[in-house]
Amino acid sequence: MKEEQRTKIEALRKDENLEYLNRHHGFPLAGLPLSPSNERCGLLNRLKQKLVKYLLADTFNEYFRAQQDYNAHLVRFLNSLANTFDQNFWRDIREEQEASWHALERNIGKQISAAISGVNEDLGKLKAGCAEQDAAVSRIDGAVKGLESYLYQVLRSDVKSPTGKALEAAAADPEYFLFENRFRGSETEIRRRLEFYLPYLKQCPGAVLDIGCGRGELLSLCKEAGIKGLGVDTDAVMIDIAETKGLEVFCRTGNSFLQEQSSASLGGVVAIQVIEHLDLPVLKELLALAKAKIKPGGLVIFETINPISILALTHNYFRDPSHRSPLHPDTMRYLMELNGFVDVQIASLSPYPQAAQLSLIEEQPYYSPRLTALITTINENISRLNNLIFGYQDYALIARVAGKE
C-alpha cells in the first residue's frame, strides 16, 4: 500500500466526526417511554394523559435533538469517507494488488525456470555420462568381437597350443566354440538356475551322470552337496575348465559313455539343454540307454527350450544353429512313458519378467458395468496372449525308473 493511502486511512480513523459519534452517541434505543394508556375515559383520565404528554415532551425533544445531532455528524463522516475512498483510491489499491500478484507470479516463474534448468543440466550431465559409458561399452564390445574374429582365424589355422588338446578341440568347430562362449551365460547365473535340481538329485540312489556338463556348474553343486557326480561333454575346452575344478569328467558323448556302463549302475542321468541338439534316433537311443543303466528308483532329468512360448522359440531356439528340432513337452512325456519311465513330471522354468509382458487394464470402481465387462474380456485375452508369447522359456522332464533299489 502506498504511503499516501496509509496517511488517508490513518486520518480517517482520527476524523473528528467519528470521534464525536463514538463519544456522544453510544446510547441504546431501547427503554424509551411508552405511549400513555387509553384504557379509561373521563375527565380524570384526560387530565392524566395531558400531564403525561407534558412530562414526556422534554424527553422526546431531547431524543430528537440527539438523533438530529447524530445524523448530522454521521453525514459529515460519510462525506469524509467518500472523499477518502474515491475512485482513484480503489484503483490504486487494485493496481497495487495486481502488481503484487504479478511480482509473485514472476518470482514463482523464475523459481520454476531455475528448477527446470537445473534438471535439464543434470539430465545433460547424465546423458553425457551415459554417452561416455555407451561409447566405452561399444569400444569394449568391438574389442571383444575383434578378438573373437582373430581367435577364429587362429583356430582355423594350423597353429597348435603347447598342450594341444583344448585349442585343437576348439579348432574342430571354432564357430560354435565362440558362439557358446558368448551366449552360455555366467557361471553364477547358471549355478543359480541349476540349484532347482538339487532336491531331486539328493534322492538318486547312486552316482549322477551329467551329460553336456560344460564348465561343471551342476557337478560343482553336487560336489558341494555331497552327491557323487560324473560328467561328459564333447567340448574339450569345457572339459579342461571342469577338470581344473577337480571334477570327474570325460570328453565323450552321452550315449557312448552310457554304453560302457554296467546295467543299473547309475543313480540318475541329467541332460541340461542337450536333447534339442540330438537327432531323433540319437534321442531315442539315449532314452533306452538311460532306462537300462539307471538303478530302480533312480531319476532322469532332461531340460530343454519350451517351444510353446513363441519368444522362447524365436529368441532362444533358433538362435543356436546346432539345434536339431524343438521338442514339445507332450511329445517328450510320450517318449519317456514309452520307454518305461514312471511318475513323469513337467516343470516350467525361466519365466519372463512381468514387466516384459503385456499389461492388463486396471479396472476402476466408477466404471459402468458394461465397461467393466468389456475390460474383463480384454484382460482375459491379454492373459492368453501373454501365456502364448511370453510363456516359460524352458521346461524340465523329471521321471523315475520303476521299482526300488
Image: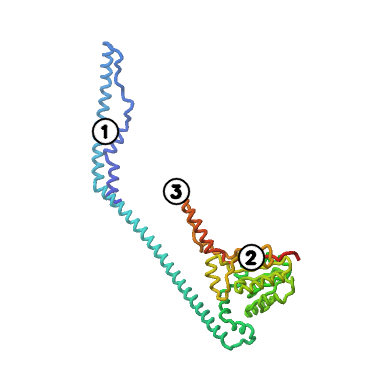
- The residue to which callout 2 is attached is 334
Residue 193: percent from the left, percent from the top?
61, 67
Question: Which of 333 and 358 lies nearest the eye of the viewer?
Answer: 333
Apparent side of residue 228 relative to residue 149 in the rendered image (left or right): right
Q: Residue furthest right?
A: 405
CA–CA distance in space, label 2 to label 1: 114 Å
Nearer to us in this view, 139 or 121: 139
The type of residue carrying mark 2 is: Tyr
Task: Choose mark 2 or mark 1, whichever is in front.
Answer: 2
Residue 75 % position (x, y): 24, 37
User: What number is the disc on residue 368?
Assistant: 3
Q: Which residue is mark 1?
A: 70
- Seen as rendered, the residue at the extreme bottom is 158
Above or below residue 133? Residue 63 is above
Q: Nearer the viewer, residue 223 or 313?
A: 313
Decide: few, some or many residues near mark 2? Use Cα within 10 Å; few <14, some 14-19, many ≥20. few
